Image: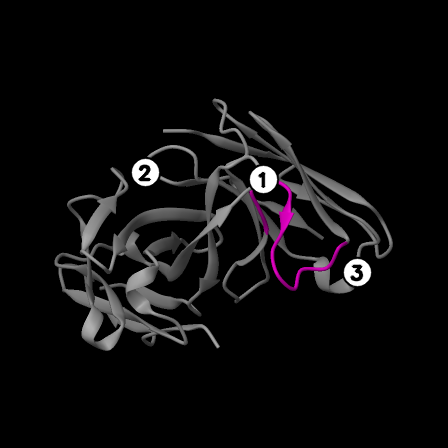
Amino acid sequence: EVQLVQSGAEVKKPGESLRISCEGSGYRFTTYKISWVRQMPGKGLEWIGRIDPSDSYINYSPSFEGHVTISADTSISTAYLQWNNLKASDTAIYYCARRRSYDTSDSLTVHAFDFWGQGTMVTVSS
Amino acid sequence: DIQMTQSPSSLSASVGDRVTITCRASQSIRIFLNWYQQKPGKAPKLLIYAASSLHSGVPSRFRGSGSGTDFTLTISNLQSEDFATYYCQQSYSPPPITFGQGTRLE
């Protein structure tokens, strides 16, 4: 059974550092890219970035680049999302999601997030 | 970036109804469009990929259609468990991936 299990809720102060994790199981971790998605309180989904665990190639959304760092440790099938200088505006639920590729009848390859972690609530408050 | 616009933002319906949610892309994304369902306090779940393909285990009352810039998600014979928020998402462009703002079905 495929699972993405995320680390628990965190409460931090502005300026502090934090790393949250997402452990994959039930599949070969290096075969699928992992994305991180933010959901601010009462708001929609925002894509933060993704990592290809097979080669650690990373893409960031311009909205998040420079403020977060994505990484992975394939030896323990775990992806990470890290902040070095948290702000109150980082308060949100963060999800990791596995990207799967689907081949269509039009000979196109479409990607979708087929499995998601349960989410990690990050609260940043003084 | 490709902008995704959903309508309506919220929708009131009853069990047994048929509802349609629309998603429009700011440029053609061919069929690189996915739909997700999110219930309160839960992670999103994939419903439809490639605009019209049903993800494994998703009931057949969910139907996706469209290509290019205009897409629809139709739910027939609405069930109580379908009351949730629905998001479209494009995977056409190079990053960033973008989501619609969501449609709350209540």
Within 10 Å of the Cα at label 1, are there few (<14), some (14-19), or many (20+) other Cα atoms? few
Q: In front: A65, or B52?
A: B52
Residue flagged by tag 1: what amino acid is it?
Ser
Colour setting: one colour
Q: In front: B22, or B27?
A: B27
Label 3: state its secondary structure.
loop
Q: Is residue A94 magenta?
A: no
Residue flagged by tag 2: what amino acid is it?
Pro
Q: Is residue B58 magenta?
A: yes
Residue placed under numbered mark 3 in the picture: B79
Residue flagged by tag 3: what amino acid is it?
Gln
Q: Residue at x 56, y 25 (%)?
A: B68
Position of A107 with respect to B76 (left or right) is: left
Between discs 2 and 3, the one toward the N terminus: 3
- Chain under disc 1: A
Position of B50 with respect to A6 (left or right) is: right
Q: Give coordinates of residue A79: x percent, y percent.
A: 26, 66
Q: Provide the residue span drawn in magenta.
A: B48-60
Residue B95: mark in rendering: 2
On screen, residue B64 above or below A72: above
Whether labels 2 and 3 belong to a single chain: the reply is yes
